[in-house]
């Protein structure tokens, strides 16, 4: 059991801007490589340097840098604070040096979470980056969520299924974005069919 194609495309637009090999490391940094090989190279690189710092450069915005040790990351923070016009941004958890939870990595166009869809199940990052597996697994997974929770909550649960007020609000916002993508896709599809 799965979802119609347009629903999957709308979910992918929500998750990864339709990038087949998208990576999101613990909501700290996202990458959109063009090939599976490049995606795997990025994963290996971040795995060896799991401490992240967001440096804000003048007229350039945030840039995430990765370090092998907390001490090296802290030295980079100190140096950035000394440079004119540079600053250090905080992560979602209000820290300036964040150790990335590599299990909390979203992979592929559907942003399958490594912890929940691979770890302990004999799957690898390479498996999750396989296009066919990515789409089939996501389709089956979200169909099960819809069957369990109903359509709107099921779609929202693809993002988070927590019970707290923040999770409920996040689910509603996620569903609104999904619906906007779906409406845009179905209206452009019906125009193309005329």
Image: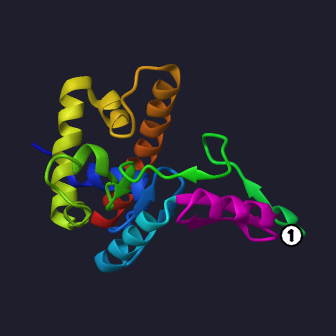
Residue 186 seen in this snapshot: no
> Image quadrant for the C terminus?
bottom left
> Image quadrant for the N terminus?
top left
Q: Nearer the viewer, residue 136 or 9?
A: 136
Residue bounds of the magenta highlight: 51-80
Tell me if 130 is positioned left or right of 62 in this view: left
Residue under numbered circle 1: 83
Label tally: 1
Position of residue 38 measured from the top left corner of the image (x, y, whole percent): 36, 79
Q: In terms of image quadrants, where is residue 55?
A: bottom right
Q: Residue at x 20, y 42 (%)?
A: 141
Tell me if 1 is positioned left or right of 137 in this view: left
Q: In terms of image quadrants, where is residue 156?
A: top left
Q: In the rendered view, tell whether residue 129 sits above or below residue 104.
A: below
Is 138 in the magenta?
no
- Which colour scheme appears in the figure? rainbow
Tell me if 68 is positioned left or right of 161 in this view: right
Is 72 in the magenta?
yes
Tell me if 86 is positioned left or right of 134 in this view: right
Q: Residues within 10 Å of mark 1 (few under 14, many from 20)?
A: few
Q: Nearer the viewer, residue 82 or 37?
A: 82
Q: Residue at x 34, y 28 (%)?
A: 153
Q: In the rendered view, tell whether residue 144 sits above or below residue 43.
A: above
Position of residue 57 measured from the top left corner of the image (x, y, whole percent): 77, 69
Position of residue 146 measured from the top left corner of the image (x, y, whole percent): 23, 32
Q: Residue at x 38, y 63 (%)?
A: 18
Numbered disc 1: secondary structure: loop
Q: Residue at x 37, y 76 (%)?
A: 41
Q: Farthest top residue?
A: 164
Q: Farthest right residue?
A: 84
């Amino acid at each position: 059991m799965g979802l119609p194609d347009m629903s999957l495309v709308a979910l992918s637009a929500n998750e990864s801007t339709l990038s087949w090999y998208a990576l999101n490391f613990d909501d700290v940094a996202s990458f959109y490589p063009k090939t599976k090989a490049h995606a795997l190279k990025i994963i290996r690189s971040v795995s060896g340097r799991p401490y992240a710092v967001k440096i804000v450069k003048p007229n350039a915005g945030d840039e995430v840098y990765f370090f092998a040790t907390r001490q090296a990351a802290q030295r980079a923070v100190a140096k950035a604070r000394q440079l004119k016009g540079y600053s250090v941004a905080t992560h979602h958890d209000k820290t300036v040096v964040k150790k990335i939870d590599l299990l909390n990595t979203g992979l592929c166009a559907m942003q399958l979470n490594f912890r929940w869809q691979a770890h302990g199940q004999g799957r690898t990052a390479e498996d999750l980056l396989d296009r066919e597996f990515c789409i089939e697994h996501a389709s089956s997974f979200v169909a099960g969520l819809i069957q369990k929770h109903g359509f709107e909550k099921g779609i929202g649960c693809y993002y988070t299924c927590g019970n707290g007020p923040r999770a409920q609000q996040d689910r509603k916002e996620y569903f609104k974005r999904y619906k906007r993508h779906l409406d845009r896709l179905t209206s452009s599809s019906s125009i193309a069919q005329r």
